[in-house]
Image (cartoon, rainbow, N blue to C red):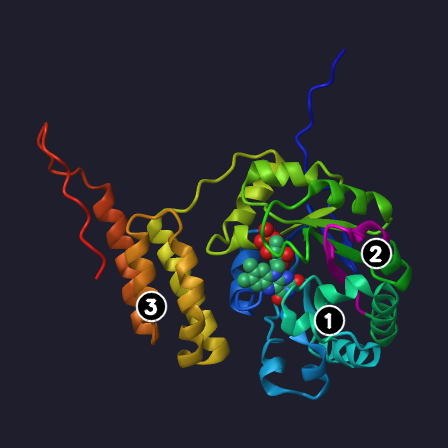
Amino acid sequence: MSESPVPARPPGFRLGPHRLEFGLALAPMAGNTNSAYRRLCRRFGAEWTTTEMVSSRALHYNDRKSLGYLEKGDDEVPCSAQVFGAEPEILAAAARRVAERGFHGVDLNVGCPVPKITGCGGGSALLREPGLAFDCVRAMVEAVDLPVTVKIRAGWDERQRNAPAFAVLMEEAGAVAITIHGRTREQRYRGRADLGIVRDTAAAVSIPVLGNGDVVDVASARRMAATGVAGIAVGRGALGRPWFFAQLRAAFAGEPIPPDPPPAERAALLLELGRGVAALYGERRGLRIMRRLAADFFKGMPGAPRLRAACNALETLDDLRRLSDRMRLEAASASLPRPCAAGSRPTPDPAPR
Ligand SMILES: Cc1cc2nc3c(=O)[nH]c(=O)nc-3n(C[C@H](O)[C@H](O)[C@H](O)COP(=O)(O)O)c2cc1C
């Protein structure tokens, strides 16, 4: 008798004292995963969030701007801070700073492909220096009582796809979970994330592995879950779509999947995010950050190119309020029936101003 197929869902795992039901995480993204955005994602069901990457050296030397990346709300539980670097002692000191700031974990970045980071031996360059990476993780584990986790890529390049063996070493060094983005450093964001290497990495270690890369809808999340990972980290799929987590949770729980929120609700979320980012960084800097974050909220919406163009002019919260009003208006006017007599051509959209 054939069994009915069980829809794939990740089993979740424990991060320190915190139980993550589905292991649903927001992947760290520089310029995006600030506290305000993380809190929105958490409200929709993200179970573990992480700051954007922060320089371990800068934290060690108490650099004010970098310490600013360690802002966190009390309701963000659990939340890790991600650090990058390649010097064990400096990383240990950075981990202590992270612990002092009340985070629930510290994550080592072994995935960043940017030459500015890899040129100093950090990010994905550590994939080529497993011994040094081991020392870095060991030093962090010895420095703090927090769970230490590591985020890696499939490997450095096609010839060196060493994620499974690298993950084993990280486990030996004391890491309690691994996130793997199924692309090599050489690929950056090109091609597709390789689920085969995610599967091999999950099978190689006994600590939880989170699969990452190209999870953009329920179908791709189920494909990722079917690799045997304990959880899933979502990056770009959650940009401008914090509600994606609610859809994933519902799918994994076997419940009806909520639709994307209507434009008025998205406009309200955008405004709420803007207020949060302005509270974190001040109105001037916050609204500059919002120029990028806001643009993602218009994906697939009527008038998206016009709305995106308007983002570049955001200076104040009032500007953002007007933009969120425009978002509602664009959607409302798109849903009106067009006065279009039989046989006549529809009026083209006005050119973007
Ligand atoms: C704008 C942007 C910034 C990112 N910044 C970081 C970062 O600070 N730390 C990190 O480990 N990964 C970073 N990543 C990589 C993501 O965490 C993730 O691994 C990658 O985007 C693949 O997952 P996705 O297909 O779900 O986006 C960044 C990705 C993007 C698009």
Q: Tell us which disc is closer to us: 2 or 3.
A: 2
The amino acid pointed to by label 3 is: Leu
Q: CA distance from mark 3 to mark 1?
A: 37 Å
> Within 10 Å of the Cα at label 3, are there few (<14), some (14-19), or many (20+) other Cα atoms?
many
Left or right relative to 321: residue 147: right
Report ligand 1 position as a quadrant: bottom right
Of residues 222 and 191, the one drawn nearer to the viewer in this rendering = 191
Residue type at the position of mark 2:
Phe
334 up-or-down from 322: above or below? above
Q: Are marks 2 and 3 in contact (CB under 8 Å)?
A: no
Question: In terms of secondary structure, where does tag 1 sit?
Answer: loop
Give residue 122's mark: 1
* Residue 62: % across, % down: 67, 88
Q: Nearer the viewer, mark 3 or mark 1?
A: 1
Q: Which residue is mark 3?
A: 320
Which callout, 3 or 1, points at the residue further toward the start of the chain? 1
Q: Is residue 77 visible?
A: no
Q: Mark 2 falls on what kind of element?
A: helix
Q: Residue 60: which quarter of the image? A: bottom right
